[in-house]
Amino acid sequence: MIDLHTHTTFSDGVLIPAELARRARVAGYAALAMTDHADHSNIEAIVSGVRRVTELYSPYAGIDLFCGVELTHVPPALIASLVARARELGAQLVVVHGETPVEPVERGTNLAAIEAGADVLAHPGLITPEEAALAAARGVALEITTRKGHSLANGHVAAMARAHGAALVINNDAHEPGDLVSAERRRVVGLGAGLSPEELLRAEANSRAIIQRLIAR
């Protein structure tokens, strides 16, 4: 299993990076990206701190660790420049906090994230057909999430991805130990979103492809 969307005490997670890495390894994960919530106020500190830990611990953790960020509630007009800044600072993976139905995310965030070429658009809510098609064209993965609340729109996201050829990934948006769900739970969430067994396998393959891309950068 691979999780491309997790949080530590660098934002609103309850685990320091070392414990998150250990618990993910014990839970059966092979790779993990730490993607703490970031905006212009804290992006330098998050990328610096998480990058230091992931580089130092990866040889010893028994799991591949990657430094990322989740740009969260950033005004859409500023997303592209902050995506570029995150990569300039050394973030290996850039996730954008999409238009989940359970938070007041500004309309236009999904489109701005896709146009900016984020790696993953997290919990994109009622993503439009035009946005899904653009995500397919730009190589931006759309997230099926196991997290309560955000998962309310999983079925819609799956349908839009299928209709327009966008890649899907399954992530936990983990904030605490219990969020590192089992392979069976991920399967149930994916099937509940309307994915076929073949689409489930493809989503896992998409996560592996993103990891390989990160390694090659």
Image (cartoon, rainbow, N blue to C red):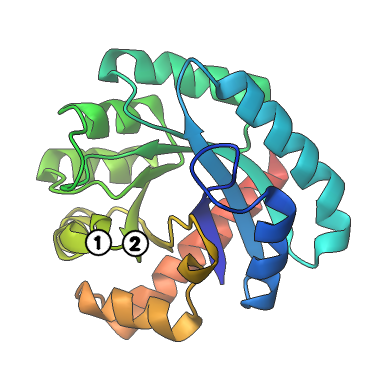
Residue named by callout 1: 151
Residue 186 figure quarter: bottom left
Label 2 crowd bin: few (<14), some (14–19), many (20+), radius 10 Å: some
Label 1 crowd bin: few (<14), some (14–19), many (20+), radius 10 Å: many
Q: Is residue 159 left or right of residue 42?
A: left
Whether residue 193 is visible to the viewer of this picture, yes or no, is: yes
Q: Is residue 140 above or below residue 110?
A: below
Q: Residue at x 62, y 32 (%)?
A: 91
Residue 104 figure quarter: top left
Give the SS element for disc 2.
loop
Q: Is residue 66 left or right of residue 101?
A: right
Given the image, on which type of amino acid does mark 2 rest?
Arg
Query: Where residue 182 sits: x, y (%)?
Result: 49, 80
Q: Is residue 68 left or right of residue 38?
A: right
CA gap, disc 2 to disc 1? 6 Å
Query: Where residue 199 sits: x, y (%)?
Result: 33, 74
Q: Residue at x 23, y 58 (%)?
A: 149
Q: Residue at x 64, y 54 (%)?
A: 212
Whether residue 162 is visible to the viewer of this picture, yes or no, is: no
Query: Where residue 77 sits: x, y (%)?
Result: 28, 13
Label at residue 168: none
**Number of marks present in the image shown:** 2
Query: Where residue 7 sits: x, y (%)?
Result: 53, 48
Label at residue 147: 2
Cβ atoms under marks 2 and 1 closer than 8 Å: yes
Q: Residue at x 48, y 54 (%)?
A: 175
Given the image, on which type of amino acid does mark 1 rest?
Ser
Give the SS element for disc 1.
helix
